[in-house]
Image (cartoon, grey):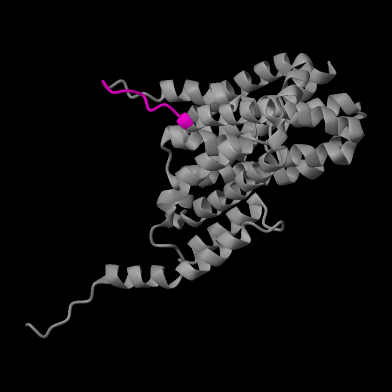
Amino acid sequence: MKNVKVFDGSVGIEKRFKSYNWLYSIIICACFLPFMSPAIALLIGLMLSVIGIRHENIHKHTSKILQTSIVLMGFGMSLSAVILASKNGFLLTVVSVTTVMTLGILLGKLFKVEKNISVLIASGTAICGGSAIAAIAPILNSKSYQNSFALIVVFVLNAVALFLFPFIGHKLGLSQETFGNWAAIAIHDTSSVVGAGAIYGENALRVATTVKLIRALWIIPLSLVIAFMNNSGEKKSIKFPWFILFFVLAIVFANIFPVFNTSYEHFNWLGKRGMVIALFLIGSNITISDIKKSGPKSFALGIVLWVVIATGSLFFLTR
């Protein structure tokens, strides 16, 4: 019996994971290149996971990468632009964010979608897509597949909106200002908002960008509210999302000391690239079983919520 060798499947799996670590290193380096967008990074991660290629332990760092990226992107936000935009778009933003979050949670219960997925999709729809999901995910302690499906829904709808919104806007004869406000409210990610605004016109681009900037700042109060609401009721302290505080300090610091503007641009760029890396890691950590578990319901929730906010906000703006 001493000469009998027992096959240990876990050892084989571990060796297989290690053999692909070099591929992860190459892809992560590619995430710093201009052609690697968040959507492409997420798709590559999903493809690797589907065919069974996964890193042995890098996914445990995903949350830290997400939080650090959020803080770094704060250096690229202009406080004066936010204040200026708030004069015209603050009330509209308050109404839209509150409505989308409430409706998203209610629809999640109706569709029997997991609570974390519902909150993530609602947050991404209400504020700024992937950035909001990235900020909220660590607070919820959501699982990788929950983050992935929220992000997938957001990116798919973003791609559709980039082409669909300008087409609808021209067909309805929307003014530049109306379209800019509509795009900022109903399109998830800032990149797609800017893209749609640029396609529609210069004034639409200006309005869309400034209003979207206001919505992005709602990451801060929403994160704090969710942190307190996510308390299980046990006698333990709530884990404060310190990275949100650092995010605020980054914005304030950058605006108080503009002399370091060149460095802030580098920090902001690094934050955006870090976000791309994080999305790649999130996508590569999803499995087929996770897809079967909650995919269709998550998409249904995201699509219905998106259609409701798009049509509702358009009605409000054109009435």
Question: Where residue 111 sits: x, y (%)?
Answer: 51, 33
Quarter occupied by the N terminus: bottom left
> Does residue 91 appear to the left or right of 288 in the view shown?
right
Image point (52%, 41%), residue name:
68
Quarter occupied by the C terminus: top right
Where 284 falls versus 275 (above or below)?
below
Q: Quadrant of residue 19?
A: bottom left
Question: Where residue 103 sits: x, y (%)?
Answer: 58, 23
Image point (81%, 39%), residue name:
196
All told, the count of numbered labels is 0
Where 30 falls versus 134 (above or below)?
below
Viewer can see residue 243: yes
Viewer-side residue, 287 vs 181: 181
Q: Quadrant of residue 173?
A: top right
Dominant SS in magenta: loop
Image point (48%, 51%), residue name:
291
Q: Is residue 198 magenta?
A: no
Viewer can see residue 308: no
Residue range of the region highlighted in magenta in the rendering: 235-242
Question: Where residue 181 sits: x, y (%)?
Answer: 79, 25
Question: Where residue 179 sits: x, y (%)?
Answer: 84, 29
> Does residue 219 appear to the left or right of 182 in the view shown?
left
Q: For the view shown, which residue lies furthest in the left direction?
A: 1
Q: Quadrant of residue 32?
A: bottom right
> Does residue 40 appear to the left or right of 225 in the view shown?
right
